[in-house]
Image (cartoon, grey):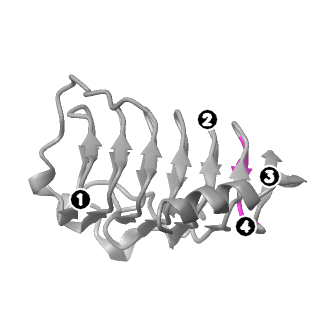
Amino acid sequence: MESVELNSPQYDTSLIRSAGEDVFISANVEIRRPHLITIGKHVAIDSGFYITTTATIGDHIHIGPNVLVIGGARTSLRLGNFVNITLGARLICGSDSFSGHGLVSGPGIPDEFLNELDLGSIIIEDFAAICAGATVLPGVTIAKGSVVGAHSLITKDTEPWTIYMGNPARAVKIRPKEQMLEYAKKLGY
């Protein structure tokens, strides 16, 4: 396979806590806390990516355009290896509870007056994929090899090698894994 050089402006990876080899991050991203981001090797992050959380990003990752990861510094995102997050996916690691027991969070509002917060981590294990427009809520683990279908809503942990679709998402099909695992092994994983 022929390597193609991308001739696009790139984000300054020296701002990131650490980044491996062969990392492309579009200049058109907003990484609110780059000092809390660790990136593996062979990673591409497209335009419009927005992240406010801490993050550990594995190897062989593609994050498509306009992906949002929100929740603040007290939440985190962890991506395994061979993960794909596509166009417009929303990973909500933390959110206001909207319970009415306090004010909705906003600039300058002291903690004592705020609603309860739903804070957590989102973990996306090896070989998983989040498809276009899907939403993942706080505290969810997307199991190894799982796929979240386009525009699906994930509110709880998934099962390994299973495809989920709908709102709320439900399991619809088992995903074959043998070929993916064989290819990953040939790449040293």
Q: Which residue is mark 4?
A: 156
Cα separation between marks 1 and 4: 32 Å
**Mark whose residue sits in front, 1 or 3:** 3
Q: Mark 1 belongs to which amino acid? A: Gly
Mark 2 or mark 3: name the one nearer the start of the chain.
2
**Residue at the location (21% across, 24% down)?**
8
Mark 2 or mark 4: name the one nearer the start of the chain.
2
Which element is circle 1 on?
loop
**Residue at the location (61% across, 47% down)?**
130
Q: Mark 3 belongs to which amino acid? A: Ile
**Mark whose residue sits in front, 2 or 4:** 2
Relative vertical location of residue 97 with respect to residue 148 in this rendering, above or below:
below
**Mark whose residue sits in front, 2 or 3:** 3
Mark 1 or mark 3: name the one nearer the start of the chain.
1
Which element is circle 2 on?
loop
* In the image, residue 173 lies in the stretch drawn in magenta: no
Q: Which residue is mark 1?
A: 108
Specify start and end residues of the magenta stretch as a single range. Answer: 152-158
Q: Mark 2 belongs to which amino acid? A: Ala
Task: Tell me whether circle 1 and circle 2 mark residues in contact (CB < 8 Å).
Answer: no
Mark 4 or mark 3: name the one nearer the start of the chain.
4
Q: Nearer the viewer, residue 185 or 35?
A: 185
Which element is circle 4 on?
loop
The percent coordinates of residue 145 (x first, y second) are: 69, 60
Task: Tell me whether circle 1 and circle 3 mark residues in contact (CB < 8 Å).
Answer: no
- How many labels were placed on the picture? 4
Q: Which residue is mark 2?
A: 132
Mark 1 or mark 2: name the one nearer the start of the chain.
1
Mark 1 or mark 4: name the one nearer the start of the chain.
1
